[in-house]
Image (cartoon, helix red, strand yellow):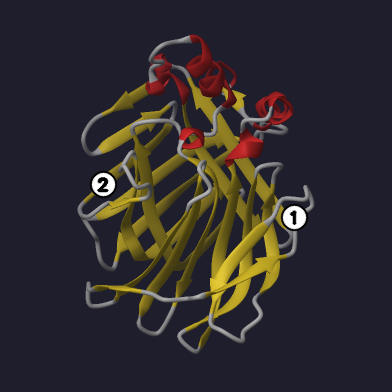
Amino acid sequence: MFSPTYFRARATEIVPRPESFCALNVALYREGRKHWAFTEHPLRRVRRAAEHLELGRSRVQWDDGQLRIDIDERSTALGAPVRGVIRLRPTQRFGKAVALDPVARHHWWPVAPLAQVEVEMERPGFRFVGSGYHDTNFGREPLERGFSSWNWCRAETEAGTAILYDAQTLEGQPRERGLLFGVDGTIERLEAPAAHRLPRTGWGMERSTRTDVGFEPKVLRTLENAPFYSRSLIETQLRGEPVTAMHESLSLDRFCHPLVQRMLPYRIRRGWRA
């Protein structure tokens, strides 16, 4: 959905085929280094069915209740191999999507708010086991036609997985969602009333989160710092419990800016070069 070639196609074609702009984005962080792969595959390299999706030599599929991702990509900068397998085993799966806007043109589906994840990378060579998360977004129109920005936050708590989803519509209406997905499969509303601004990113982009009243959240590490997007680890507090959370900020106003659209192609590869 953040493809610059798809963005241009939407401006020139009535209904461009999304299958012609598919990519598997891989971001690995370790020991102060980052490995980044983002290859956009043309239609002839995309194969899909109900239970799997193939992009070039990479494959994503549901297999015996687990999500398996076979990665065979090349890094965007130097073309170094990025190969390995990720296995995501949901602790609970939720089958209900949530409307993000008043007229339900955009939806968010937290498929597996809590999961066990096993990562085995051949190139670069390393392995780890930990906890993870799987969700998806879908809609009937591009994101920038419904929203100007949003902030998203996920944290593991003693009771389950807490998610805060704060979106700003183009009309300036805030759409705040706070949900707690319990380890027993229940879903309850999560109140986190105090909004706090976080420090601006290196590109000067604003970001914020909600937390308990009286607690001052802070950024522990900024993992991705792009002109229109940031991904960070933050320290916050929910229902009196201190937690480390994954946080994302997105500015769709910036994403649509012509200068940003000219910069984005340098962050991707096209499939015929993969």
Residue 25 position, x and y percent, is 53, 40
Dot 2 or dot 1, earlier in sequence: 2
C-alpha separation, residue under disc 2 versus residue under disc 1: 36 Å
- Residue sitting at x 42%, y 76%: 191
What amino acid does circle 2 point to?
Answer: Trp
Of helix, strand and loop, which one carries label 1? loop
Quadrant of the snapshot with the C terminus:
top right
- Residue sitting at x 43%, y 66%: 163
Inspect this view and state whether residue 125 appears.
no
Q: Which mark is residue 37?
A: none
Q: Is residue 188 left or right of residue 127?
A: left
Residue corresponding to mark 2:
62
Mark 1 neighbour density, 10 Å: few (under 14) some (14–19) many (20 or more): many
Residue 195 position, x and y percent, is 58, 71
Would you place residue 265 above or below residue 247 in this image? above
- Residue sitting at x 28%, y 77%: 183
Residue 193 position, x and y percent, is 50, 75
Quarter of the view holding residue 146? top left
Residue 183 or 108: which is nearer the viewer? 108
Residue corresponding to mark 1:
201
Inspect this view and state whether residue 175 appears.
yes
What amino acid does circle 1 point to?
Answer: Thr
Would you place residue 219 above or below residue 227 in this image? below
- Residue sitting at x 39%, y 30%: 141
| Discs 2/1, front | 1
Quarter of the view holding residue 56? top left
Quarter of the view holding residue 75? top right
Q: Is residue 152 left or right of residue 191?
A: right
Of helix, strand and loop, which one carries label 2? strand
Q: Is residue 223 left or right of residue 243?
A: right
Q: Residue furthest bottom?
A: 240
